[in-house]
Every structure is written in structure tokens, then in C-alpha cells.
Amino acid sequence: MSKFELVQMNIATMKHPLDSPAMAEFVASLDPINALAECSPGFVWRLKDDDGNATAYRPLGDNILFNMSVWRDIESLRDYAFKSAHVDIMRRRREWFEPMSEANATLWWTACGHRPTIAEAIARLEHLRTRGASPHAFTFKQAYPAPEEGQTIVFDDACPAV
């Protein structure tokens, strides 16, 4: 069993305020999609606010939704993201969210049991945006395997791009 888990973080710029009628179908999908994630094989943890989702977290601006979760491995996350009902929501994302010119999601490995902070996730996304994919921050398209047993991961909330 690996000593590492996979973190995913993604952001999305809303076209309309979350409480607007234009976002109603997206909002209605949150609880079922989050429940699906939680019962998916390989799911470990997800960021939640008092409403049970992460929509209250807006560290990058009022119109940018922030989401983060932890998974056993890349395959588990890939199955949930691209082979479950989650795909139906992804297909409709252009109805609710603006296209982004920069990376809007990142993956990285963390020690089992570590729950990443929002600041850590933002630093990883910035690292991906400024330096490209690496073992520090990567994407599905350019994924990196979990560190070898015996390797350590340094946790530092400071932005590594500085």
C-alpha cells in the first residue's frame, strides 16, 4: 500500500452569481455529484464548507469557485471524473463557467493523512502555471507517479515559484 495520496484542485470562473437562476441546475447537481464522489472507489477526502460543498471558499475572487479533494490514486480519480455521472456535469460546464486561458486544475502527491490547505493548493496551481508540469504539480495529461517508498515530500505553504 502506498504511503501517498493524490490531491486534485480545480477552479472555475462563474458566468453568473451562484444564486442566480442561470446557475440553478449546477447548484442542484452539487449534492448528488459530491455524494457520488464520496462513495466512489479510491475517494479519501474533500474540502467542505458548512453547506457540505466548497462553494463558500472564494480565495481567488468572488466569481471563482474552488474545489479540492484527495484520492487513493490517479486511476480512482480518473474513473470518477471521466467515467461516472460527473461527466454529464463536465459536458455542461460551458453553460456555467467562463473558459480559462491558464491552467485551472492541478494534481500532486501528498503523504497519506495530510489534508492540504487552500494556500498549498493555490501555490501548486501557480507552480504549474509558471513552471509547467513536474512532480510538484501536474495534470492528467502529464501525470507523474507517486514518489518511491522512502522518498519524502516537503510540506511548505510558501509559494515555490518565488
Image (cartoon, grey):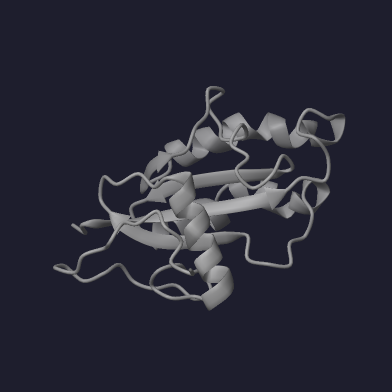
What residue lies at 16% left-to-right and 67% top-to-bottom? 149
Q: Let me know if residue 140 appears in the view.
A: no
What residue lies at 38% left-to-right and 50% top-to-bottom? 71
- Position of 60 relative to 57 (above/below): below
In the displayed structure, does residue 32 sit left or right of residue 15?
A: left
**Which residue is at the front of the view, 44 or 103?**
103
What residue lies at 19% left-to-right and 69% top-to-bottom? 151
- Position of 128 relative to 17 (above/below): below
Tell me the quarter of the picture where residue 3 sits: bottom left
- In the image as oriented, which residue stretches furthest toward the left? 150
- Position of 18 relative to 10 (above/below): above
- In the image as oriented, which residue stretches furthest toward the front? 162
Q: Assign the N terminus to one quadrant of the image.
A: bottom left
Residue 11 placement (x, y as % from top left)? 62, 51
Residue 19 placement (x, y as % from top left)? 78, 28
In the displayed structure, does residue 110 sit left or right of residue 125?
A: left
Q: Let me know if residue 129 appears in the view.
A: yes
Residue 116 placement (x, y as % from top left)? 39, 47
All told, the count of numbered labels is 0
What residue lies at 83% left-to-right and 30% top-to-bottom? 20
Residue 147 placement (x, y as % from top left)? 26, 69
Tell me the quarter of the picture where residue 55 sits: top right
